[in-house]
Image: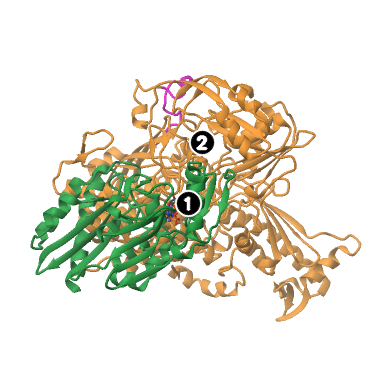
Amino acid sequence: MRLPKFEYFEPETLEEALRLLAEWRERVCVLAGGTDVLVKMRNGRLKPGAVIALERISSLNGIGFDLRKGLTIGAGAKLSDVTSHPDILRYYPAIARAARVMANVQVRNMGTIGGNLCNAAPSAENAPPLMALGAVVTAASLEEERRITLDDFFRGPGLTAMKPEEIMTSIFVPTPPANSGASYQRISARCGVDIAAVSVGAMIMIEDTVCREVRIALGAVAPVPMRALSAEAFLKEKVWSEEFLREAARISADESRPISDVRASLEFRKQMVAVMTQRALEEAYGRAIKR
Amino acid sequence: MQTVLYVTDDQERKGNKEIMEEFTVIGKRISKVDAVDKATGRALYIQDFKLPGMLYGKILYSKYPHARIIRVNTEKAKALPGVITVLTGEDIPPVRLGVYKDNPPLKAGKVRSYRDEVAAVAATDLETAREAINLIEVTYEAVPAIFDPEEALKPEAPLVHENHKTNLLKMPWNLHYGDVEAAKIEAAFNVEERFSTTWVTHCCMGTSGAIADFDHADNLTVYTNTQIPSLAQKDFQETLKVLGFKDKRVRVIKPCIGGGFGSKLDTYAYEHVAILLAWRSRRPVKIVFEREEEFCATSPRQPTVTYISMGCDKEGKLLYRDMSMVLDNGAYTSWGATTPSVMMMPITSLYRVPNVRYNAKCVYTNNTYSQAMRGYGNPQATFAIESAMDMLAEAAGIDRVEFRRINSNQPGDVTPQGLKITTCGLPECIEAVSRDLEFGRPREKGVGVGLASLIHVGGGARIYKSDGCGTIIKMDDYGKVDVFTGASDMGQGADTIIAQIVAEELGVKVEDVHVFHQDTDICPWDVGAHASRTTFVAGNSALGAARKIRHRLLNMASETTGIDEDKLTLKNRAFFADGKQVLPIGKLLRGSHFKPRGEMMMADNFYDPPNENMGRDFSGNMSATYSFGTHGVRVKVDEATGKVEILDYIAAHDVGRAINPMLLDGQVHGGVLMGVGYALTEQVILENGRNMNPDFRDYKILTAMDAIHSKAVVIETVDEQGPFGAKGIGEPGCVPTAPAIANAIYDAIGVRIKDLPITPEKVLAAIKKKNGAVSCGIDAFTQKEQPCE
Ligand SMILES: Cc1cc2nc3c(=O)[nH]c(=O)nc-3n(C[C@H](O)[C@H](O)[C@H](O)COP(=O)(O)OP(=O)(O)OC[C@H]3O[C@@H](n4cnc5c(N)ncnc54)[C@H](O)[C@@H]3O)c2cc1C
């Protein structure tokens, strides 16, 4: 379908972009890699009066790591850069994996991690591992710059805590604590180019076989990516065991709120929450005790 | 991907190896002749065509699965600037389409499925046409609809076509050879089971499209994506007749086609709508489908419910096979309804089985209507047969491979249906698969192997009175060859195969041969690209024409050179005697008409294979030869998620002769991948008749990233009837895949999945059931306990 007419801007600084955003307000759409935006424009679900492309704002694209503080990923970093960054591969394998198993080569070369979060699909691939690792995003407007934890970021399908005049600039992930490990697991109908039917991100910290810290985030099983708080509470301060692991997986399935659609039934999704949670925790545990 | 070539012992004894080495073109891995054009964008598809003054057409589809049309208001659409013509079912003469002639291109009075065409618009540009469609107001009155074919057979079911009085199509697919009841008593081991398959669709890369164009004298040219140019010509001719045009010329031009797979075996409403819009507007009209339309408004493979029972004696010899089926025909009738004619072949003739009975009912429902798709019913039938073969082998306590060896077809067999099996590489295919997959290998947890075989027509299939194909060949003054074939290339490589056959026979290079296949004004008649018949039938037709030319060339060369004809050989674009070149072909050809009583080098040939129409009892030797194959697969099943992973795949096919092993690979690997999708992931999800997944996000065709490691084994039996010994291979690749995978899953985890596709959910439910669970949870749609399965 031919796209309706729209203005197109390619600002080179964040400030310029924010000014345009403030000027056009609701009628504008921010474009990062465009792999969600263009699909929506083409099928007529999105009809912006103007499009602001972020690609030329180089300050949004970097990835930096500081062992004492943590990882800062520019909102405009390409998914393919996330999957191949040596520090991410070494310290945040769950993040690298989420960005690697999603979509296909072409989409990963265009799509950004910020776009994936701002698009706020219930199945957004990068959300569960980032939530599990306690990520915080930074949103900037002409007035201020503020930090939003990822736990508070998602408000509904396609809805976020960001204001229309804000642009996401970066995502910060603290350095994982010693003796911790994380994992990302997902299942879909086919292997390639497929939306996850269920995905799970998990992080645990183990001290003398006791599970001191645990965070579990579920994707595609509720209107927004969600934490499995009951399962986390159950596991916390417990001595690691097969039995507790299985119970935690069961609890997380219980607290998930999936729907049935053409991709999977509610029942199957619940079962898979348990399986994926168990596998994520197992892998996270394996990594935790290795480090 | 990997290909291995085996020549059967028999052929080796005949010294066929030596003959093979003499070929210069046959048997060579030659790139498709249109490969570069397609890769570089030179090839023209329907999307690329634009005629002067051309309008763009759009179709409005029904909003209900079954409803009366109370009123259609087109005023607003007509008033939109740029709109030239708006048509509804009321505005057109009674054109009827399809096998049963039950389908008007635009519906009046009633719609019978969501895909029903209610109105159409032609406008100066596509956007306007799209807008205009949305301005048409239709008032419907919904009536009760029926979506389940078994339910539709009940007396209280709503009628899809009132005049037809019943939802059961009047096509009595019934056969009984031998005595099945007596054999049931005699059998030592019996199995009985129900299997089902679902809707899947062709997913052609190029979407459907057509342009209709009348000239000043009302002659009609239709540019269209079709596998049947000659039959389409006839259909369009009929539409012209209804419009009141007599003795007009209809020309069908077939652009490059981005995939057929059976989807283009009939003419469709959109083609006739383009004609009607062009007729009304007196301008060329183009209709091209968008992807969503391609999913919703083309005809998929039909679902089947199959009941099978099968038995064998103590030694494992099959005694009988008894099958009955219900097919969802959908709301109108195209070739989907006739697929039982091909299902009969595996049912009566896959393995030796003396007593067979088969009954099939095609049933009208308010679903989309069904069509031919690669294999033409064979995959559905083979899924039930080969699943049941494993069950019977287990019941009889016989190894699965051995069981198939015992019952394998053999050369010289005549099957109960009267199929005369000549060359038959099935035993070699079974051996190749069992050897390669190491069936006896110690098992790992969750890993299993399975196999399944197939029989398919390999020498045409006589469905019409004629199963023929015409060819014209002409040579120019420089030894270049133009071949005008009736065959339809739709991407499968027919043009390359024909070029190879002609080049071999005429001693020229493949690049010297240009194959024309796209225009009924230029090319001779052919019945269409179906039944894996093109290499065999069009190949033989081209070979016959080339032989005539070769004969004349040798004759003339002998006259010119004074050397005996049998001392001359024709190769490398020249004549040779005693190993020395004596005369280039071009020189001879130029001489042939620059002289008194000159002549042109042209020949034609019509080839109609020696096969038979089926008789009243459905018996008859449908094809001039039969293709066989066996597929084997090793799977790993994740018992926690139900996901099936394919570790190894081997596809062994008896192809007669591999004319082009590279294209053969393409057919086999492509067929296998289509079969894997059929087995595991693909499904058109119809919810009360509405397509719920009309895009590639949710229609799970396998992607390049899902491609499996597969190995193609080619068994050459060199069939006497085939061109250079070749048999058809277009469809077989996707026929036995699903049962091979289902059998491997059973081997891996001990559960048998009887309904396609084998989704993780079904596998999990089956595991639960095996472990004794009765309920498999609450169904989200119905909010009711669902039984496991
Ligand atoms: C074939 C295909 C397969 C896909 N497969 C997957 C998959 O498996 N898993 C998955 O999760 N997704 C998948 N996607 C979706 C998509 O690719 C991802 O969500 C991607 O990360 C989006 O990034 P983008 O840069 O292209 O976003 P864009 O399309 O540019 O933007 C997405 C949204 O975010 C907003 N936005 C972008 N950047 C910012 C910013 N810095 N500040 C504020 N708002 C911003 C935009 O306005 C828009 O609303 C797939 C898409 C396609 C086309």
Q: Which residue is drawn at 48% across and 69% down?
A: B11
Q: SS of the residue at dot 1? A: strand
* Dominant secondary structure of the residues highlighted in magenta in the image: loop
Cβ at disc 1 under 8 Å from ligand 1: yes
* Residue B398 visible somewhere in the drawing: no
What is the chain identity of the residue bearing mark 1?
Answer: A
Q: Do the residues labelled 2 and 1 touch (CB within 8 Å)?
A: no
Say if B532 sits above or below A285 in the image. above
Q: Quadrant of ligand 1?
A: bottom left
The quadrant holding residue B85 is top right
Q: Quadrant of the N terminus of chain B?
A: bottom left
Name the residue carrying label 1: A30
Residue B58 image point, x, y percent: 60, 35
Q: Where is residue B55 in the image (x, y as percent from the top left)?
A: 68, 38
Rendered hue of chain A is green
How far apart are the two marked residues, 2 and 1, measured between alpha carbons? 48 Å
Q: Which amino acid does label 2 sit on?
A: Ser
Badge 1: residue crowd in 10 Å (few <14, some 14–19, many ≥20) = many
B314 to B775, vertically: above or below: below
Q: Is mark 2 on a helix, strand or loop?
A: loop
Q: Is residue B395 left or right of residue B149?
A: left
- Residue labelled with disc 2: B334
**What chain does mark 2 sit on?**
B
Which range of residues does the magenta coloring cover?
B159-174
Residue A135, image x, y percentages: 29, 59
Residue occupying the far top of the picture: B70
Q: Colour of chain B?
A: orange
